[in-house]
Image (cartoon, rainbow, N blue to C red):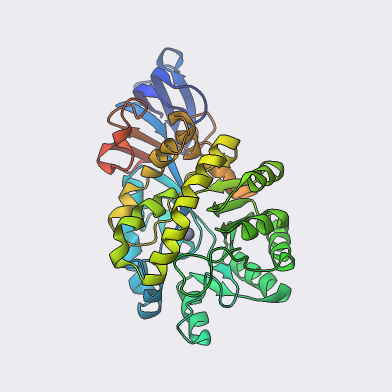
Amino acid sequence: MGHHIIAGTLIPGRGEPISDGTVVLDGDEIVFAGRTTDAPGRSSEDTVTEVDTVLPGLWDCHAHFAGLTDPDLMKIATASPITSTARAVPDAAALLDAGITSVRDVGGLGLKMQPAVEDGSIRGPHIHAAGRILSTTGGHGDIHALPLDFVHDVTCQHGFSILCDGVPEVTRAVRLNLRDNAKLIKVCASGGVMSEIDHPMHQQFSDEELGAIVAEASRAERIVAAHCHGKAGIMAALRAGCHTIEHGSFLDEEACDLMLEKGAMLVPTRFVVEALLPQMDLLPRYVYEKGTMVADAHAQSLKLAIAKGVKIAAGCDIFVSGAMYGQASREILHLINAGMTDLDAIEAATAIAPDTLGPQAPLSGQLKAGFDADVVAFDTNPLDDRSVWGDASRVTHVWQLGSRVK
Ligand SMILES: [Zn+2]
């Protein structure tokens, strides 16, 4: 028995849109996507849904489930991980309702939530998770105002970060994440904005440590995602063979060229920059100061990367529980505003997105026979009306592995 989704417009993820299209699902797989006139005949047992516009389920390639109530990472230290997970459960459902059927969780509770999503205990996108972020002592994954041993315990319990220094410790940190079934490894290769003392322009981890992290991950067919703002961290991550650059705030011509040469991808996360800047009064003072320093450079870097043809995937970097998760598709609009065509921005959130997982990529992100039956429908064609991006109420249907979940 098949399910036929008949659409006024079919946007396949890669390639040109099709007017009067049909997607046929059989079990958890797409068996046909194309013109309705070419679709296989329907038997009396087949079911039918008519929609306005159909797309592949969207991806958020830089997600976090943290259960924080405001944008202050220090709060991790004062909440039980169970309480935080309880807060993150509706965030997962909100992503799904917004049309996000897959996320790449780059640090947080997602690794432990993933089995509960897959067995149907909670609603949420497929979670491909990194587990704990590898950070140097004093680096972006540290909480600098708190005693070090306490930080180590609390950040590990929350699945947030693991502090490690030197080749033996970073190698062990990768292995600990692999032991938890992490599908990728996340590392802080530069300082960050949300942490207190460290500087976004400084490289974190030595070339030798980054090389050891990539080597250990590669042996298990995992890619390494590198958080980087400053150029020194970006270049070190690329030299070491990291597959994705997260944020990439200070990319220049040379760095873009090295990304192209290495076949590395950029996950710019413009969403979080745009979302946090208007909330400055809620942020710790150091976040405000570092955030304003990074924001404009980040906008220029993104435009340059698009113009240079760097491979880009959509990711949001939302880490505060609540309404933002329902707005995750707005990253597509940010990519359009930075210079992408509408179709290229959609591809960044669909067909290109699984590539951020390297060898662990599922067959997802395209309306194409043989791909996972993760499918979304909107109430209008997003190529004609960009107001759908960021608005979950415009998502009329969501199918996940062939089951209708909205
Ligand atoms: Zn992040």
Q: Residue at x 39, y 57 (%)?
A: 318
Taking 5 as reference, is 225 above or below it?
below
Asked if residue 119 shows in the view, the reply is: no
**Left or right, residue 82 beside residue 263:** left
Q: Position of residue 364 (x, y in %)?
A: 51, 39
Q: Residue at x 54, y 54 (%)?
A: 246
Q: Residue at x 62, y 75 (%)?
A: 164
Taking 362 as reference, is 191 above or below it?
below
Between 332 and 368, the one lying in front of the other is: 332
Q: Position of residue 237 (x, y in %)?
A: 66, 57
Between 217 and 207, the one lying in front of the other is: 207
Q: Residue at x 48, y 85 (%)?
A: 150
Quarter of image, res 68: bottom left
Between 306 and 245, the one lying in front of the other is: 306
Taking 229 as reference, is 160 above or below it?
below
Q: Is the N terminus in the top left, top right, bottom left or bottom right quadrant?
A: top left
Q: Position of residue 24 (x, y in %)?
A: 43, 27
Quarter of image, res 381: top left
Quarter of image, res 312: top right
Q: Residue furthest left?
A: 393
**Left or right, residue 45 beside residue 235:** left
Q: Position of residue 251 (x, y in %)?
A: 58, 49
